[in-house]
Amino acid sequence: MDNKILSLKEKFVSELDKIDNLADIESIRVSYLGKKGSVTDLLKGMKELSNDERKAFGQKVNELKGLVNEKITEKTKAIKTNELKEKEIQKEIELMPEFDLSMPPVMDRGSYHPITLVQRECERIFKSMGFTVEDYSEIVTDYECFESLNIPKHHPARDMQDTYYLTNGQLLKSQTSAAQNAIYKKYRDALVNDGVPIKAIFPGRCFRNEATDACHENTFFQMEGVMVDKNISISNLIYFMKTMLSEVFQKDIKVRLRPGFFPFVEPGFELDISCLICGGEGCPSCKHSGWLELCPCGMIHPEVLKAGGIDPDEYTGFAFGLGLTRLVMMKYGIKDIRDLNSGNLKTLSQFTDDEN
């Protein structure tokens, strides 16, 4: 009798594995557990057994009955789940728009961010004038961002209200000038031994903890530029900046220099350009002044040159921190700087790669 139970169990499991619909599930349930089912037939044969055998055999038949019930329940649940998933998939398929393979494909062309386009254009212009393009980390040390640039301990720029400090003592670069010291040390030997001028630009993203408005953002892009050689003067600075602006805007741009204090240059200036959004009449972008601050600049401070291992008695140089973000606003007539960081694809899609 035990062999009969084992054989019936194996047969049931084999048949159940082949079932994939609820109708067959009901059929196998009746076939094994119905009044004339296989498991029920086993119970009918118990009358031929002794009392002790009947008790043991009845227990095994009940275990088989429980197993059949459990397996049928599990299979029913699995089939219902699978059918539900198939219905959901079919519903999604029905809701999908029809696709006509005979129609030509519609390819939405991607575009570069306007800051990327202007940065590449500025890099091309400065390369044509003999400058190298350098890259630098966005996370820098206090020495790189402040001490090497002659910025004293009490300077407001070191305040946590203006600079994002990290828990390890480093900070997010608040100005591209943080790369100056490394650039001077990188090209110092070629300058001193071979007489090759240091001419480099290093664009990058900067971060400042400040309130945002139409012309200020806490994340923005700058392009630092330096030139160091013998007998470099303000005239060299003005020439390179005017050449760059004329190339970017494809016309002569009205500029002005205002005296400005920056610890890393002496003398220092603010280079402003006439606001191209309002034509110099005044608007929120230029704070109704008609001028837009483009970059701090000036002659590199002797202490900064010394920190880079360059003798300030023999060499001079200029440095500027070009505001790429504001340059983009002027070139494309963008009135609010916050639009550039909005991530609005509809707004950004109007800019195309000028290289294609």
Image: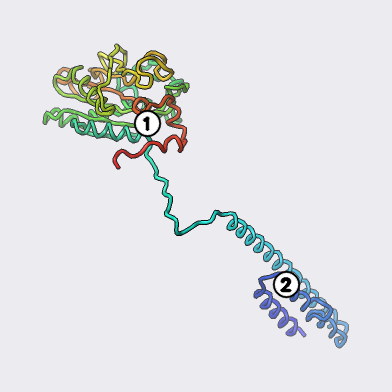
Residue 163 picture location, percent across and down:
42, 24
Q: Residue furthest top?
A: 259
Front position in the image: 281 or 161 = 281
Mark number for residue 276? none
Front position in the image: 19 or 286 = 286
Front position in the image: 325 or 175 = 325
User: Is 288 rendered above or below residue 47?
Assistant: above
Image check: 267 left or right of 342? left
Total labels: the figure holds 2
Q: Which residue is mark 2?
A: 23
Q: Residue at x 37, y 17 (%)?
A: 153
Q: Quadrant of residue 142?
A: top left
Specify which label sits upstream in the sequence, 1 or 2: 2
Q: Residue at x 47, y 23 (%)?
A: 212
User: Is 68 rendered above or below residue 207?
Assistant: below
Front position in the image: 304 or 132 = 132
Residue 156 picture location, percent across and down:
40, 16
Q: Residues within 10 Å of mark 1 (few under 14, many from 20)?
A: some
In the rendered image, is residue 18 in sight?
yes
Q: Residue at x 43, y 18 (%)?
A: 284
Q: Residue furthest bottom?
A: 48
Q: Amino acid at mark 1?
A: Arg
Q: Residues within 10 Å of mark 2 (few under 14, many from 20)?
A: few
Q: CA distance from mark 1 to mark 2?
A: 66 Å
Q: Amino acid at mark 2?
A: Ala
Residue 292 picture location, percent across and down:
35, 18
User: Is 48 rendered above or below residue 113?
Assistant: below
Q: Quadrant of residue 235?
A: top left
Quadrant location of the N terminus in the rendered image? bottom right
Mark number for residue 205? 1
